[in-house]
Amino acid sequence: MDRLRSLGLTFLVIATLAIVFMAGFGTHWLTSRVAGDTPDNPLAELAIGNDAQPTEFGVFWEAWRILQRDFFGDQPANQQRTYAAIQGLAQSYDDPYTYFVEPQPRQREKENLSGEFGGIGAWVSTDDQGNIVLKPMPGRAAETAGILEGDILVAINGTEITTELSQDQVLDMIRGPIGEPVELQLRRGDAADLVTVSVVRERVETPSVEWRVLEESPKVGYIAIRQFTERTADELDSAIADLNAKDISFLVLDLRHNGGGLLQSSIDVASRFLNDGVVLFERKNDGSRETYRVEAAQRAPNWPTAVLVDGATASAAEIVAGALQDRGRAQLIGEKTYGKGSVQLIRDLSDGSSVHVTVARWQTPNGHEINGVGLSPNIESPHQDDIDAPLAEAIKLLTGNVAQN
């Protein structure tokens, strides 16, 4: 139970610190470097690449020169103009999952999918006046350095925190390399003087899995996967081992509000519940199809299982739900899923930014196309404000099967 409380508290970090639903995931990781800028024309390298002729970009440079010559006011930095041009280029492909990410959001994205980052170990929230309020986690660096619950963040490394900054921007300033200090100025209560605290950043883990026993007679276990990260498979193994030691008879796997994550992680998770066979098919632009099969892994016991899904279950979460449904391993309970069935390559650029590019679409083992369609649950059960109806329906389904046997 102590472990559960710890996981529950730590999960709040995800809600506060993670990027919310970054247009869905289900990604392959592949990095490449793109040639750098030239002083005069930052996009010149891209404009005259092997696949394009310089004359095709003539109108772009015409507009660039006109704006630079005629605009009344401050000129935006070359980098700002370059990023805006790349964003517009990505948007011209008319695909919501092909997009450009600037360096700081890209770094947060990497951290979220790795399941850890360099931080101070504190929850961050915004009060009614727009102040950034800190609450240190027990035993972590922020508490050790003397930060108290309710301290208001005034400055980070000498940079004033204004209400114009978003919470994500503030988090970017707090986070950094593990082992390096960050200086915080704080307003504490009614004290006139500010408090200055130096905190050495430490590794902060963001668990993606939580679990507990729901019912005692018969015992029903519960595992919720909130995102598919590099740590998910190992965390799931811990959950399975703990619930197995508690001698559960049934399992509810909760994939609600799971926006996806890493493709490999979804295959790893599905492989815990399937003995062999297909997890998904990946359909390429050239018409070819790649098959992803169950991989060698420590299998979960063959508990009768129900999977909870909703309209925010997307991408990698749909891969797992679709595989377990098609293979007859579990029934889906809840609402139709989001329908994000495309795969993105993430190409890292030379300055730390990246381009996400849709390169394929995936299908369930039965060949069902998910993109724009979603998965239909076996049992429809919308969530109600006063009761978790899908969870109650799952328990009823699982334990009711016992009475019938």
Image (spheres, helix red, strand yellow):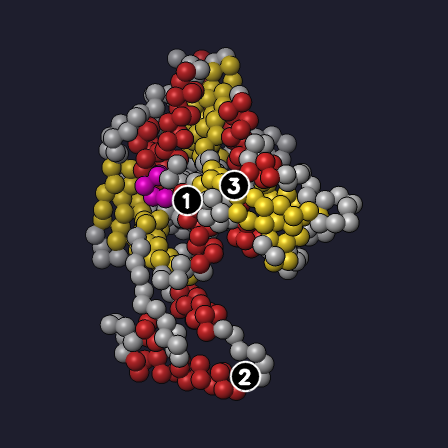
Coordinates of residue 90 in the picture (x, y in percent): 40, 65
Secondary element at tag 1: helix
Label 2 environment density (alpha carbons within 10 Å; few <14, some 14–19, many ≥20): few
Give whichever of 360, 381 is nearer the camera.
360
201 w.r.t. 102: above or below: above
Q: Quadrant of residue 314?
A: top left
The number of callouts visible is 3
Residue at image location 30% in from the left, 32% down from the top: 271
Q: Which residue is mark 1?
A: 113
Which of marks 3 and 1 precedes in the sequence? 3
Residue 12 drawn at (x, y percent): 56, 37
- Look at label 1 and name its amino acid: Leu
What's the distance in space between the residues labelled 2 and 1, CA to CA?
Answer: 42 Å
Residue at 47% in and 55% down = 105
Q: CA distance from mark 1 to mark 3?
A: 11 Å
For the C terminus, the image quarter is top left
In this orientation, which residue lies closer to the viewer: 359 or 400? 359
Q: Is residue 79 magenta?
A: no
- Residue 264 on the magenta span: yes
The image quadrant of residue 245 is: top left
The correct choice, above or below, for 33 with respect to 387 in the image is below
Instruction: Specify the label residue 175 is tagged with.
Output: none
Q: Which badge, 2 or 1, comes first in the chain's sequence?
A: 2
Task: Read off the magenta span.
Answer: 259-266
Nearer to me, 309 or 265:
265
Residue 393, visible in the rendered structure: no
The residue located at (32%, 41%) in the rendering is 264
Determine which residue is flagged by label 2. 71
The answer to the question of whether label 2 and label 1 lie on touching residues, with beta carbons closer than 8 A, is no
- Residue 238 horizontal/vertical position (percent): 40, 26
